[in-house]
Amino acid sequence: MTLSDTDLAEVSPEIRALAASSKRTRTPVGTDGAVMTWREWGPESGGGEPLVLLHGSHGGWMHWLRNIPELARHRRVIVPDMPGFGESDPPADIESPQDHARAMVDGLRALEGISGPVDVIAFSLGAMLGCFMTLPECGGDAPQLIRRLIIVDAGGLDTPLRTADNRSVKGLTGQALRDVNRHNLGAMMIHDPACIDDTAIDISMFCGRRTRTRVMYHVIPDKLLAVAKRVRVPIDVIWAEFDYIHPDPELNTAVIRAFQPEVQLRVVADSGHWPMYEQPAAFTAAALDLLATPVRPLLPETEHS
């Protein structure tokens, strides 16, 4: 699925401008002609260490809209629409996290200039797929491809889960559709109603209707925990203070600390589940702070079995 100017006409100028400034690359998903889309931003010289951003469920690269410009001042920022989201086709098995991760590993390797390991920041569903990307069965052979993983507000750690009051958008159009998207953003994604602006609603509507996979239904309650225990690269955590569906940053980090004792936590104050959008400056500062810390040595594989 390739976006046209007509498609992007439905979103805010802020989104259109950032899309227009990106470099776009297509890579295969499997062997049946399916493809996924990667967008890149960064220094005009092509410099900067690669930083991959993975979005959440029913999302796309736009989840990182308000972080990309600042991050791209420091790094080569690479943001895919993960398989089955946005402009990217799903793999043949839309239930398989491994197949989704394998397509991203293959695609990342195919990008121009990826000759060494990359850092990954992975939000919500992206955290599980990012963990799979480090594993041998998905082609990751960490740390040769991925050297560090920062997870953000991720479900699947077998911690307390609250159900958001999401309402169906089926059959709705016009203002009624926007109103329900506003409600759902407030119920699950954004803590302060004042931060639910038209651009947030545009992103929710644009990405939601372009979701063509079921991989997100294979995370809860403990699927992330199972795969994270096998990850040999360092994991750090950014968590929103008021994440409604996955409350308590310290509790969720403690789960990771049980098998990665040196994990670092940064809490984004005054934010709900989507801190990158609600508090972009604070989130980006936390991300850059973690990225500036030395990469911890790998733990022996036996400690992650």
Image: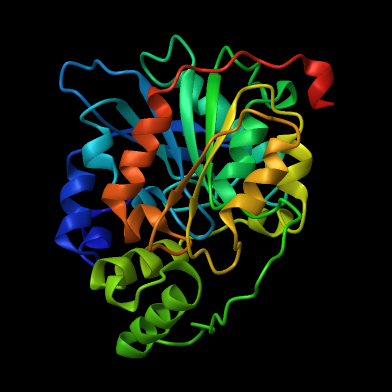
Q: Is residue 44 above or below residue 7?
A: above
Residue with the most extreme bottom position: 176
Q: Could you tell me how many numbered marks the image carries?
A: 0
Image location (x, y in percent) of residue 53: 43, 38
Looking at the figure, which quarter contains the C terminus?
A: top right
Q: Is residue 193 above or below residue 78?
A: below
User: Would you say 70 lies left or right of 269 here?
Assistant: left
Image location (x, y in percent) of residue 134: 64, 26
User: Would you say 224 lies left or right of 25 here?
Assistant: right
Q: From where the camera sits, is residue 38 visible?
A: no
- Please give the name of the residue rendered at 23% of the width and 28% of the height, measured from the top-left corner: 42
- Residue in front for this viewpoint, 242 or 11: 242
Residue with the most extreme top position: 115
Q: Kindly indicate the quadrant of the structure image that contains residue 244.
A: bottom right
Q: From where the camera sits, is residue 251 visible?
A: yes
- Please give the name of the residue rendered at 69% of the width and 60% of the height, measured from the top-left corner: 217
Q: Kindly indicate the quadrant of the structure image that contains residue 254.
A: top right
User: Would you say 172 lies left or right of 76 here?
Assistant: right
Image location (x, y in percent) of residue 264: 54, 35
- Residue in front for this viewpoint, 195 or 45: 195
The image's colour scheme reads: rainbow
Q: Kindly indicate the quadrant of the structure image that contains residue 271.
A: bottom left
- Please give the name of the residue rendered at 68% of the width and 66% of the height, measured from the top-left corner: 161
Image location (x, y in percent) of residue 146: 54, 21
- Residue in front for this viewpoint, 237 or 179: 237
Q: Is residue 286 above or below residue 268?
A: above
Q: Is residue 173 above or below residue 19?
A: below
